[in-house]
Image (spheres, rainbow, N blue to C red):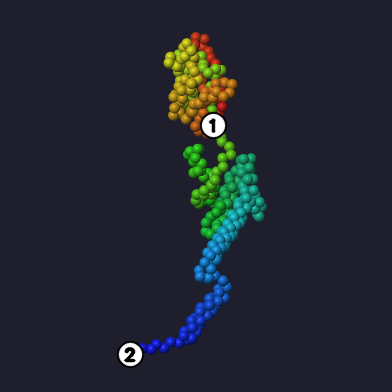
């Protein structure tokens, strides 16, 4: 038995061409409707990526513009409220009422009418509070002090990464800090004419730092040069041990014309106080020979 399949090749070709033409017409119609050359990844993959990035950038710019516009509106409202407060303070109100500044001066010079003046001052303060309460943006009061600037200091002066400087309430803001100058530290020096001082057992150096006294007394083991000298090295070691944990660092400086024992505070600020007293048990009662204290407070 023979089986025959009827085929119509020209008809199949026609259907294929018709479908392809229909798809092209659909793509062209879609482009005409949207007004865009790229509507899907098959149109232009790289162009689609660039288009989406540009759209995101444009959207971000529009958002920034809206935010700037809102900020401008808020500042305009705040400026109007502050202008009203300024009039109450300086006496430039429309009804000619004396301002807060003038009334306070009158209270000092006119004691007889002080009660009436104080009542006027109280009235003005109430009006100023009313202005502060009514100056709002999006339902939030903006000049009542809630958004005041504040300064927060880190507890570690050596670490500036966690330092917040004059930031408005409402959240943390990362800032970059450029150190252009370093505050001076409290520093004291004991200047020696030579690399050692003349001393006897019982002579002492007293250091008073922020109200606490630290005393180093010369011992027999500290003496050299026939028992009447203490070297700069020994002095630095003994005084450093004495001041351990006090907040004062002890170093030596022999780069100049003198041999210096340097005492420097860990903390910054003018509130630190440093005093150095020299005592001697010599029969003559003079200070330790060749030792001169110099104090520099910073």
In the image as oriented, which residue stretches furthest toward the left? 1
Q: Nearer the viewer, mark 1 or mark 2?
A: 2
Q: Nearer the viewer, residue 212 or 18?
A: 18
Q: Is residue 202 visible?
A: no
Q: Quadrant for the C terminus, please.
A: top right
Tell me the SS state at disc 1: strand
Determine the residue positioned at 59% across, 48% down: 120
Residue contact between numbered discs 1 and 2, judged by CB atoms under 8 Å: no
Pinpoint residue 56: horizontal percent, then vertical percent: 54, 62
Q: Secondary structure at mark 2?
A: loop
Q: Residue at x 53, y 77 (%)?
A: 24
Mark before the other along the chain sequence, 1 or 2: 2
What residue appears at the point 51 percent right and 16 percent down from the top-left corner? 197
Residue 156 seen by the camera: yes
Query: Along the horizontal axis of the image, is 111 left or right of 226?
Result: right
Residue identified by numbered label 1? 185
Residue closest to the far top: 283
Q: Please name the residue that numbered disc 2 is placed on.
A: 1
Image quarter of residue 133:
bottom right
Vertical arrangement, residue 212 with respect to residue 281, above or below: below
- Image coordinates for residue 20, horizontal then vertical, percent: 51, 79
Q: State the quadrant of the N terminus.
A: bottom left
Q: Nearer the viewer, residue 248 or 41?
A: 41
In the depicted view, which residue is nearer to us: 104 or 145? 145
Q: Pointer 1: residues within 10 angstroms few (<14), some, or many (20+)?
A: some
Rounded to the nearest whole Å, what is the CA distance between mark 1 and mark 2?
115 Å
Residue at coordinates 46% horizontally, 15% vertically from top-left? 223
């Amino acid at each position: 038995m023979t089986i025959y399949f009827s085929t119509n090749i020209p008809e199949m070709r026609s259907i294929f061409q018709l479908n392809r033409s229909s798809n092209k017409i659909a793509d062209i119609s879609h482009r005409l409707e949207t007004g865009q050359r790229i509507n899907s990844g098959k149109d232009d993959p790289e162009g689609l990526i660039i288009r989406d990035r540009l759209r995101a950038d444009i959207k971000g710019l529009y958002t920034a513009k809206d935010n700037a516009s809102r900020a401008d509106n808020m500042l305009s409202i705040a400026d109007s409220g502050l202008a009203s407060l300024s009039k109450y303070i300086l006496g430039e109100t429309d009804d000619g009422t004396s301002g807060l500044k003038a009334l306070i001066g009158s209270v000092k010079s006119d004691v007889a009418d002080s009660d009436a003046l104080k009542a006027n001052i109280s009235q003005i303060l109430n009006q100023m509070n009313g202005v502060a309460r009514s100056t709002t943006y999006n339902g939030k009061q903006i000049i009542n002090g809630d958004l005041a600037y504040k300064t927060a200091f880190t507890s570690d002066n050596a670490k500036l990464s966690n330092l917040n400087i004059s930031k408005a309430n409402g959240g943390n803001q990362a800032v970059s800090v450029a150190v252009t100058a370093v505050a001076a530290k409290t520093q004291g020096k004991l200047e020696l004419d030579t690399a050692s001082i003349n001393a006897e057992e019982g002579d002492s150096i007293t250091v008073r730092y922020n109200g606490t006294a630290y005393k180093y007394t010369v011992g027999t083991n500290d003496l050299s040069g026939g028992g009447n000298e203490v070297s700069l090295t020994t002095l630095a070691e003994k005084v450093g041990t004495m001041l351990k944990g006090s907040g004062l660092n002890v170093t030596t400086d022999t780069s100049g014309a003198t041999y210096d024992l340097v005492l420097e505070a860990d903390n910054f600020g003018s509130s630190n106080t440093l005093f150095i007293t020299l005592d001697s048990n010599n029969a003559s009662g003079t200070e330790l020979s060749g030792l001169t204290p110099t104090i520099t407070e910073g």
